[in-house]
Amino acid sequence: MQKLFLDDIRSIDMVYDASREAEFDIVRSYDAFVNYINENGLPLFISFDNDLGEDANGNVLPDGYAAAKWLVYESGLDLKDLEFNVHSANPVAAKQIQALLDNYIKFIKNG
């Protein structure tokens, strides 16, 4: 199964080696993230950005942390084998995403 790259602006080669580009599918928004997983299932690996831009009216769109929370609280998917990376330039949000997923995966592996 593919790897998933959630980022509103970056391309794969801005985060990973360009030779790995074919491994990833890119989604640019929270809604695209949810739709991708609902249609294709949980990928083996997800790379998270946090800040996913604004709408036409300047409203902040749901972010990578919202995507991680959807995975944990709403998706109903078994995440115990999920591998992920947080490539967000926002250090506070990156720690939130990392901690949420690390703690949840640890909990389900031990529970």
Image: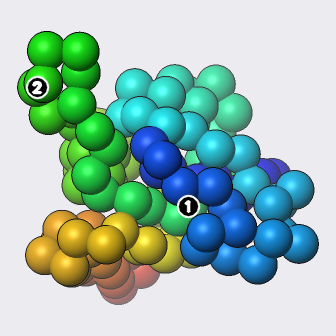
Nearest the viewer among 63 and 79 is 63
Q: Residue at x 22, y 70 (%)?
A: 90
Q: Of marks 2 and 1, which one's residue comes earlier in the chain?
A: 1
Would residue 50 appear left or right of 80 to someone viewing this image?
left
Q: At x 69% / y 33%, what residue is drawn? A: 40
Q: Position of residue 5 (x, y in %)?
A: 58, 54
Which mark is in front, 2 or 1?
Answer: 2
Residue at point 81% right, 61% down?
A: 21
Give neighbour class at mark 2: few <14, some 14-19, many 20+ (Cα, 10 Å): few
- Mark number for residue 26? none
Image quadrant in which the C terminus is located: bottom left
Residue 86 point in image, percent of width and height: 41, 73
Asked where in the image residue 52 lies, by quadrant, the reply is: top left
The residue pinned by badge 2 equals 59
Q: Which residue has dot 1 on it?
A: 46
* Residue type highlighted by circle 1: Ile
**Which residue type does callout 2 highlight?**
Asn
Which residue is at the front of the view, 14 or 106?
14
- Secondary structure of the residue carrying tag 2 is loop
* Residue 33 visible to the viewer: no
Q: Is residue 32 left or right of residue 111?
A: right
Residue depicted at x 31% and y 72%: 89
Using the numbered discs, state the Cα–Cα distance from disc 2 to disc 1 in whole angstroms. Answer: 25 Å
Q: Position of residue 71 (x, y in %)?
A: 36, 48
Looking at the picture, does residue 85 appear above or below residue 74?
Answer: below
